[in-house]
Image: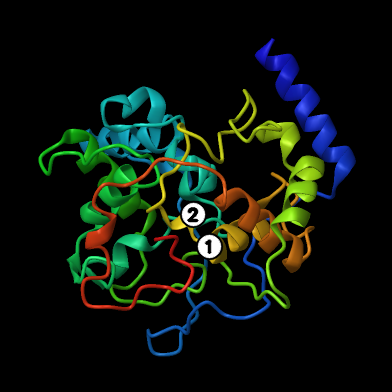
Amino acid sequence: MMWLLSTILGMAMLVSCSVETAQVKTEGPRGADQTGGARIEFAPPSLETIPGSQLGEQIRLGYEIVVNTQEYGRPYVGNRLNCTNCHLDGGLNPNAASFVGLASVYPEYRARNARINTLADRVNECFERSLNGRSLPPDSSKLQAIVAYITWLSQGVPQGATLPWRGLQHIDSRRPFNPANGKKVFANKCAFCHGSDGLGTMAAPPVWGPQSYNVAAGMARVTVAAAFIKSNMPRTCGWTLSDDDAYDIAAYVDSQPRPDFADKMRDWPKGGKPADAPY
C-alpha cells in the first residue's frame, strides 16, 4: 500500500509541475563570502563516503536521527515531524536550511536568547520548537551524533565563513498578505499531501494542529514559512508559486491553531524581535 501511494503521489507531482533543480535560486545572495574572495561551493560529501570507523557509526546515527526522527529521537519529540521535513533530504538540500557548512558558523550569538550558542544548543532549540519536544541532554549520544553528522557535512568549509546557501532565500511581498487567497491556493496545491485540514497524511507532515510545530518555531513566522514554501513546495516543484501566493499560503497556515511554547516570553530579552514573530 505504501509503495502504491508513493507511486501515485510521484506521478501526480510529475504531471502537475516541472522537476525542481537542487540548486540555490539566484535572485540575490544570502550572504557574501568572508574567506578572502574565494567562492564557497555547495559540495557536500556523499553519504557513501562516511568512514567505516566508530566516528562513521556516530555520523550514520546522526543521519538516521535527522531523517527518521520519529523512530530514533522519539523520547525527545512532541509531534509528528522529522528534522528532514524542514531540512529537506537529510539537510542536503541547498534550498531548505541545509546543514552543509553549518558547523563552521558555530559558536554564534543569537538575539533570540541573547547569548553565544553552540551547534548542540541550536539542535536542541529545534527539538523544543520545531519538534515541540524537549532538549537532549548535553552528554546524549543522540545529540552528539547529530552534531557529528552536521560537522561531517561541513568538512572543508572554513570556520566563520558566510554560506551563500545558509537558511532560506528571502522573498518580498508586494502587497498585504491575503490568507483567504492562501486558503484557496492551499486547497489546490497543498491539501493533496498535507490534508485539507492541514493535519498531515501518509505523504506529508501536519502543518498545523497539535502534531505540528509550535508558535515559537522559525516556521511559525510568515516570512520564514513563505521563503520555504516558495523554494520547496509543492515538493519537487519549488519556484513554481508566485511570491504573493507563497506569502498568502504562509499567512493562512500560520494563522491556524498550533501548540504553544511555555518559555516564549523569554525570547529576545535584549530586543530585536522580528516584526512577524507571532507573540
- Residue 89: x percent and y percent? 54, 43
> Do the CB atoms of the residues marked 2 and 1 lie less than 8 Å apart?
yes
Q: Residue at x 30, y 54 (%)?
A: 151
Residue 52 shows in the view = no
Query: In this figure, what is the number of numbered marks?
Result: 2
Residue lying farthest left?
139
Q: Which quarter of the image is occupied by the C terminus?
A: bottom left
Left or right relative to 117: residue 211:
right
Secondary structure at badge 1 equals helix
Residue lying farthest right?
15
Q: Which quarter of the image is occupied by the N terminus?
A: top right
- Residue 184: x percent and y percent? 80, 48
Q: How far apart are marks 2 and 1 (CA)?
A: 6 Å
Q: How crowded is mark 2: few (under 14 residues within 10 Å), some or many (20 or more)?
A: many
Residue type at the position of mark 2: Met
Query: Relative to residue 67, is residue 159 depicted above or below?
Result: below
Q: Which residue lies under the disc numbered 2?
A: 219
Q: Which residue is drawn at 29% across and 43% down?
A: 146
Secondary structure at badge 2 equals helix
Left or right relative to 213: residue 25:
right
User: In this orientation, which residue lies closer to the viewer: 144 or 59?
Assistant: 144
Residue type at the position of mark 1: Val
- In terms of image quadrants, where is residue 202? top right
* Image color mode: rainbow
Q: Residue at x 29, y 44 (%)?
A: 128
Q: Earlier in the sequence, mark 2 or mark 1?
A: 2
Query: Relative to residue 184, is residue 265 depicted above or below?
Result: below
User: In this orientation, which residue lies closer to the viewer: 144 or 209?
Assistant: 209
Query: Relative to residue 91, is residue 117 depicted above or below?
Result: below
Q: Which residue is drawn at 46% across and 32% down?
A: 211
Left or right relative to 168: residue 27:
right
Q: Which residue lies under the disc numbered 1?
A: 224
